[in-house]
Image: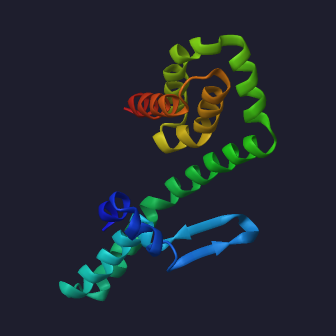
Amino acid sequence: MCIIERLIPQISTPLNRFLYIRISKYNFELPLLYSPGFWLFLTTIITIFIFKIPKIKVWESLKRTTKQWTPFLFSTTCFVAVAQLMVYTNMTNTIAHFISLTFGRYFIILSPILGGIGGFLTASNTGANAMFINLQTQIGQSTGLSPSLLAYSQNVSASHATM
């Protein structure tokens, strides 16, 4: 379903209007029918019923999953919080402006190094992207480099560094 939604805009636009969670106070929006996580959750629930998995097995699985997931949730939340703090305090913009003036279009050489450093320091592609993707794309906008190219560079180099 996710592939169909993304390939055919005439399907995704109406679906984004239903089952939509919005919390204005936190500037949070989640169109459930457009979220891959929702479809995975739905598939899990359906699978439990189709294969008649006992409640005790489901409960044991939930406990083990929560135990494994908790450290990841905490660290990722911290990375995202730091990234948002940097954006809201204008730190990302200030650093991007300085780097743009200093390196200009030559930043294309340094972009994968920055991404790799993020991946190495956080040991997580998600953490590295949370911390540095805004910086990379703002530098791209300031220097005339493709923000998408710098985002790709960030993502790939962070992934390699975590390996």
Residue 124, can we see it?
no
Residue 42 appears in which quarter of the rendering?
bottom left
Q: Position of residue 148 (x, y in %)?
A: 50, 34
The extreme front residue here reads 10
What coloring was used for the rendering?
rainbow
Task: Identify the residue at image location x=58%, y=43%.
Answer: 130
Q: Position of residue 13 (x, y in %)?
A: 46, 68
Residue 11 appears in which quarter of the rendering?
bottom left
Q: Position of residue 81 (x, y in %)?
A: 68, 50
Residue 37 appears in which quarter of the rendering?
bottom left
Closest to the observer, 63 or 160: 160
Task: Identify the residue at image location x=63%, y=73%.
Answer: 22
The extreme right residue here reads 89
Q: Quadrant of the C terminus?
A: top left
**Is residue 55 shown above or below 70?**
below
Indicate left or right for 116 with 58 as reference. right
Q: Quadrant of the N terminus?
A: bottom left
Give the number of callouts: 0
**Is residue 131 shown above or below 3?**
above
Indicate left or right for 11 with 110 as reference. left
**Is residue 51 shown above or below 85?**
below
Closest to the observer, 116 or 103: 103
Residue 154, can we see it?
yes
Q: Position of residue 122 (x, y in %)?
A: 54, 37
Closest to the observer, 90 or 19: 19
Task: Identify the residue at image location x=50%, y=53%.
Answer: 72
Closest to the observer, 35 or 144: 144
